[in-house]
Every structure is written in C-alpha cells, then in structure tokens.
Amino acid sequence: MSTMNTDKSTTSFSFDRRSPRTPLLGALLLAGGMGALSLGCYGIDFDEARADVYYCQIDSECLATQACAEFRCVDNTGPALNLTLPEALTPFAADEQTLVVNFDVKNFSLSDSASNVDGTGKVAIAIDGERVNVTDIAGAQLELGGSLGPGAHQLSIQAVFGDESTLYTNPSASDFTTFYIQDVNPAKPQVAIVSPGQGHVHVVGEPLVVEAAVRNFVYVENNTECQWEDDCDPYAIGAECSRACEPEFDQGHSHAYIIDRYPDCLDDTPLGCNGKYALSMRLSEGIEGDEDEVRGVIPGDRFTEAGPLELTVTLQYSAHDPFPNQTFVIFDQITIDVVDP
C-alpha cells in the first residue's frame, strides 16, 4: 500500500489512466484494427461481437463497444466514469484536512435508491483500495483530518448498484488517479506509481507497463554521484547530514520491484535485494518519459504464477544505490493480482 512509504522493444506506447483494469501495452502492439483481432481469435469461426474471446493489448484493438481488459476484448456497455478532481499528481499539504473529488458520468444515472436497477446507482470512492465514501452525486468532499501519511496515494471511483455492494463490471465503470501527501518537510523528494492502479488484475506470462512520476527529484540518464551519508535522513527537520557534493537538484532514476518484504529485504545477508529489480527506469533506450515521469515494461516472463504481488517503485542514484540511502530509501508500493487466463 502507498501508506507504507517511508515518505514512502523500444517502440513508443500510450497510457490511459482511466481504467485500473485496462492493460496499457501499446509498446507491444502486434497489429492494428481488425487484423489484430483476427490474429487473436481462439475460436474456429470469427464472430466480432463475442466478448472475452479475442486477444488484445490496447482498447483500439477491440470494437467500439468493447475495451481491452486482462488481454481480452470485453463488453464495455454501461457506466463511464472520468475523474476530474483531484488532478493527477497534485501535492497536498502534510496536514490536509479535506479532499474534494469530482467526476463526470456518462451512460449512468446517479440515484439515492437502494434498489438494483440497471443503468442507475451510486459511485464508491476508495483511497489506496479502501472504500471511504459512497455518493449519489457527481462528487464528494472527503474528510481526511490529516490522516493520510506522506507519499503517493491512489484515489479510485467505481460505479455500483443501489445496494452499494454490487459492482458494474464494464472497464469504464471505474477510474483512478494518483496524488501526493507532502512530507512535513515539503522539499523532500517523492515518487509515485502512476500506473497500474491499486489492485490491478494482471495475467500470467504477459508484460506489465509501469509508469512512475517524481516531485523534488529529476529523472536523468546519468548524474554525478552526490550521495548522502548512510543512516542519516537528510530531509528530517533539523537533520545535519553530509553528502559527497552539492548538486543543483536531486536526480537519478527509479527501480521497479515485484518482490516481497521491500524495503526490509535490503538488509538481507549477504547481498540484500537492491539488485533484484524487474525494471531499471532510467531515461535511455526502452524507457520513455522526461525529467518528471517515466514509463517502461516489465517482461511477461517475470510473471510466472498466479497470486498477489507487491509492485514497488523506488528512487535510485545512477550507480543503482538506494536514494538517499538504504536506511531511508524513498519508494511507493501497491498490490497487484496476477491471474491465470
């Protein structure tokens, strides 16, 4: 969970943050349009109207009434939700008391009725996968009371029936975004998993697109190693930590891990887990992005069996050491669910 933060192929590909269950794999596009659908057909006779049969990697490979979810074209008839507030990657103060949530609704009528009537219902709101509100209007004001810890957090919305427990299952019935809660020291660097979303369902053997963003930190291909000393938190109020030199700004890259017990495993003997990353998100060949946001692909052969996985994205120096040091490494973490097709 993001609350655990200590703060806490070269083809281009596109990203859509609107559906946490929609794989975002344009980098691995095999073919476009109906050609890709026909190649992915698992039946003997082609039937373009069938759902959950044809292999896909992005929505554009499916029909207009479908979406790509778990690498299959599925029916997307039903509610369409789009979060408008909070804006993506907004930093809020450490003692933030309230959070305003707004969203647009299509193909769906909001109602205070407790009855389950198709096409009507409410919207459930969750932070880091935990439901915090259910509303029958297109928004809500969440009372935080300063309860969220510093670091990145994901806010998600989900269309539900009147009983508030039965979900609409079409992919567009949900949306999510990532925001920050600043540290007590607002200048402390932070990293956020922008995609996938908390609880994302991934398929065994398929590649996973990961997108990360930073604040008070700059992504570079290489940089001068101005490392902070060990066992000292340089961003703690009043701390007097030393470093090898004084860079213009904190810089480096990110690692993506799919291992358990991070960051505790950094102290494992004899070598720790720092080198067990699934993806080095350094601005270079195979990694897209800029100084604020990067994206890359974890190969499908890293996902060998079904079950929950912790996906962690960290800050690293160019020499791959944890930033600012191993004791106070800065990271973001979510849980994804790997399933057999």
Image (tube, rainbow, N blue to C red):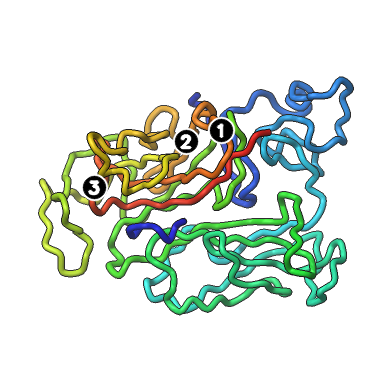
Q: Is residue 164 above or below residue 220?
A: below
Q: Is residue 84 above or below residue 14?
A: below
Q: Amino acid at mark 1?
A: Glu
Q: Amino acid at mark 2?
A: Gly
Q: Write the residue at 72% across / 62% down.
A: 159
Could you say which quadrant of the image residue 180 lies in?
bottom left
Q: Nearer the viewer, residue 107 or 198?
A: 198
In the displayed structure, does residue 90 sit left or right of residue 237? right
Q: Which mark is residue 305?
A: 1
Neighbor class of circle 3 (other Cα within 10 Å; few <14, some 14-19, many 20+) is some
> SS class of the residue under badge 1?
loop
Q: Which residue is mark 3?
A: 326
Q: Nearer the viewer, mark 2 or mark 1?
A: 1
Q: Which residue is mark 2?
A: 296
**Dividing the picture into quarters, in which one does residue 288 lie?**
top left
Which of labels 3 and 2 is toward the front? 3
| In this picture, residue 260 sits left or right of residue 275 | right
Q: CA distance from mark 3 to mark 2?
A: 24 Å
Q: Nearer the viewer, residue 104 or 6?
A: 6
Residue placed at 62% from the left, 69% from the top? 102
Give the mark nearer the N terminus: 3 vs 2. Answer: 2
Please provide percent x and percent y for residue 49.
Answer: 87, 36
For residue 97, side relative to residue 322 (left or right):
right
Question: Tag 2: Cα neighbours inside 10 Å, few (<14), some, or many (≥20)?
Answer: many
Residue, x 67% and y 66% (percent of image)? 124
Please tell me which residue is depicted at 76% across the width and 36% down the height of the picture: 62
Q: Position of residue 308 (x, y in %)?
A: 54, 44
